[in-house]
């Protein structure tokens, strides 16, 4: 065989070998009995270059990402997931918009795992996790301890951007993940429904807030999202039994349908994720409009103070 012919056949075969190596990549079997839905730093460090994994960095500051990030992590600002809807600001995008963000911009396909990282385990990561749940995508994990835990353990970082190409992502809206204003209005006095307000206590009570009206939805229980975490510099989710106690003492149990809300839906996503993905609550919905929408309708009831 001549050198020209050899080069021809090598050029023809190599792409197929490369594709085959990715096709037969070892499947991911992620299990975390204590905290389902979370991935630990050591687990993620072992699969940062896996072809079936997309790591999404959702830290608040782009500059922090530019300085240093997890290898192969692509940056997404949480503000991309905040759009106006019917004049109400900071609402989640619809299915078509989310599909474009996930597939075309983040290079995520339906068969991939999405690993999400933020700082201080803040709700940026869980908001994307909820959006993926809303679209029926189950291969999702949030990094427990976030960026601070990754750094504290001396795990690899980089300034290089990942090489990505657009993919197709198709979502199927799961209505049971979502609660709208009218749906909640009709169930305010329903014994099988409980509302959880994830805002800070002073916003819940009406002592603080910039909205048209202050206070909370009558009957809603206040569980500030940060109370699900422990630690100072590195914040991780509390033990499962501690989380179960936190919610049960507030009357939030698995036999009820739970509606979570906050100011914009972002902080509420943290409580949604904790209940749905860590504690296994079967029926949890996120009020997408949250307090921004509810308070804007002057005919809807509002209650000040610390009592539900």
Image (spheres, rainbow, N blue to C red):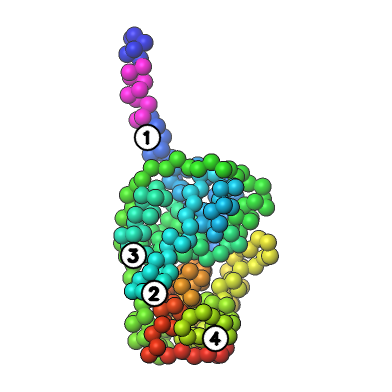
As measured in the structure, the alpha-carbon distance from the residue carrying label 3 to the one carrying label 4 is: 30 Å
Name the residue carrying label 4.
206
Front tag of 1 and 4: 4
* Lower sequence index among marks 3 and 4: 3
The spot of residue 31 in percent (x, y) is 51, 56
SS of the residue under disc 4: loop
Q: Is residue 26 visible?
A: no
**Residue in the picture at 49% in, 72% down:** 268
As measured in the structure, the alpha-carbon distance from the residue carrying label 1 to the one carrying label 4 is: 58 Å
* Lower sequence index among marks 4 and 2: 2
**Residue in the picture at 36% in, 80% down:** 181
Front tag of 3 and 2: 2
Say if 81 sits above or below 72 in the image: below
* Lower sequence index among marks 3 and 2: 2
* Lower sequence index among marks 1 and 4: 1
Is residue 288 on the magenta stretch? no
Front tag of 3 and 1: 3
Q: Are marks 2 and 1 in contact (CB under 8 Å)?
A: no
Q: Which residues are magenta?
A: 7-16
Name the residue carrying label 2.
88
**Residue in the picture at 38% in, 42% down:** 165
Say if 242 sits above or below 93 in the image: below
The spot of residue 207 in percent (x, y) is 58, 85
Name the residue carrying label 1.
19
Is residue 14 on the magenta stretch? yes
**Residue in the picture at 65% in, 51% down:** 151
As measured in the structure, the alpha-carbon distance from the residue carrying label 3 to the one carrying label 1 is: 33 Å
Name the residue carrying label 3.
94
Front tag of 2 and 1: 2
């Amino acid at each position: 065989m001549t050198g020209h012919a050899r080069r021809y056949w090598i050029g023809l075969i190599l792409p197929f070998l490369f594709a085959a190596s990715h096709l037969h990549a070892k499947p991911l079997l992620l299990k975390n009995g204590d905290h389902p839905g979370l991935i630990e730093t050591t687990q993620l460090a072992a699969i940062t270059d896996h072809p079936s994994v997309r790591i999404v960095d959702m830290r608040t500051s782009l500059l922090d990402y530019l300085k240093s990030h997890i290898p192969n992590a692509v940056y997404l600002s949480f503000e991309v997931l905040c759009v106006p809807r019917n004049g109400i600001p900071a609402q989640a995008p619809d299915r078509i918009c989310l599909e474009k963000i996930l597939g075309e911009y983040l290079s995520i396909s339906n068969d991939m795992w999405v690993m999400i990282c933020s700082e201080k385990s803040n709700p940026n990561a869980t908001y994307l996790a909820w959006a993926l749940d809303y679209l029926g995508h189950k291969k999702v994990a949030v990094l427990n301890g976030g960026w601070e835990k990754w750094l504290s353990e001396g795990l690899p970082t980089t300034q290089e951007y990942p090489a990505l190409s657009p993919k197709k992502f198709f979502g199927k809206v799961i209505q049971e993940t979502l609660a709208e204003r009218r749906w909640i209005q009709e169930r305010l006095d329903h014994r099988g429904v409980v509302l959880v307000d994830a805002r800070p206590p002073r916003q819940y009570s009406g002592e603080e807030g910039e909205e048209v009206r202050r206070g909370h939805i009558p009957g809603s229980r206040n569980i500030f999202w940060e109370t699900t975490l422990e630690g100072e510099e590195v914040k991780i989710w509390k033990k499962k039994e501690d989380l179960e106690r936190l919610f049960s003492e507030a009357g939030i149990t698995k036999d009820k349908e739970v509606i979570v809300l906050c100011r914009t839906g972002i902080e509420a996503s943290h409580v949604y994720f904790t209940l749905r993905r860590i504690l296994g609550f079967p029926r949890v919905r996120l009020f997408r409009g949250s307090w921004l929408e509810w308070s804007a309708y002057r005919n809807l009831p509002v209650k000040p103070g610390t009592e539900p």
